Amino acid sequence: MANICRTELTIVATPEAINYFKEKFNNSHSGDYPSKLSKPHIIDVFGSRRTENIVDKIGAKWISIYDELEEISETECKVQLESAYHIPSSMISEIYLQLEEIDGSVKMYGRYWDEGFFPIGVFELYYGDIFEEEENVDEEDYELGVDGSIWEVAIEPMFKKLQKKLNKVMKEI
């Protein structure tokens, strides 16, 4: 099993909640933990406050910020994180809880993939709980990528299939 899981998290909220998140996210870092810098570590800013255990704070063994925050609009932004083995579920839930205090109708969703595509998945938060659908890419899907990009030929279609399944679940809630 591979070790690195990339998570794309999209947040849709009021400008006030988005600004709060942007300020906290942009003023944190993901280097050594505990932090030796004057800037707070992302774990201290968004890690679960219900535990002291690092794995429980994040939902993974470690976490790093993959890319800068992408501001889509004044009410939507996207961040990319890398973590060990799976999405940083505890941290994502804590982000939701912090933003929900500012905007009771905050929406958060995303997708993730392990570096070997074992697994890939999509998720959505509902009142702080993460609902997800995931699958592993099998060997046949890798063979599809021989004539083109595996991402275009196998991964994106699988994301779409998983999103359809998740949308059905979310409708029933």
Image (spheres, rainbow, N blue to C red):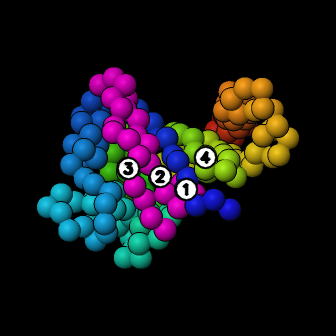
**Image quarter in which the N terminus is found:** bottom right
Q: Which residue is mark 2?
A: 82
Q: Amino acid at mark 2?
A: Glu
Counting other residues with Cα less than 10 Å from the Cα at mark 1, is it few (<14), some (14-19), or many (20 or more)? some
* Residue at the extreme left of the image, as rendered: 38
Q: Are marks 3 and 2 in contact (CB under 8 Å)?
A: no
Counting other residues with Cα less than 10 Å from the Cα at mark 4, is it few (<14), some (14-19), or many (20 or more)? many
Residue 137 visible somewhere in the drawing? yes
Asked which secondary structure carries label 2, the reply is strand
Residue 172 visible somewhere in the drawing? no
Asked which secondary structure carries label 1, the reply is strand
Q: Are marks 2 and 1 in contact (CB under 8 Å)?
A: yes
Count of all numbered marks drawn on residues in the image:
4
Left/right placement of residue 116 relative to residue 126 reads right
* Mark positioned earlier in the residue sequence (4 or 3): 3
Q: Residue at x 20, y 68 (%)?
A: 36
Tell me, for residue 65, which label it has, or none.
3
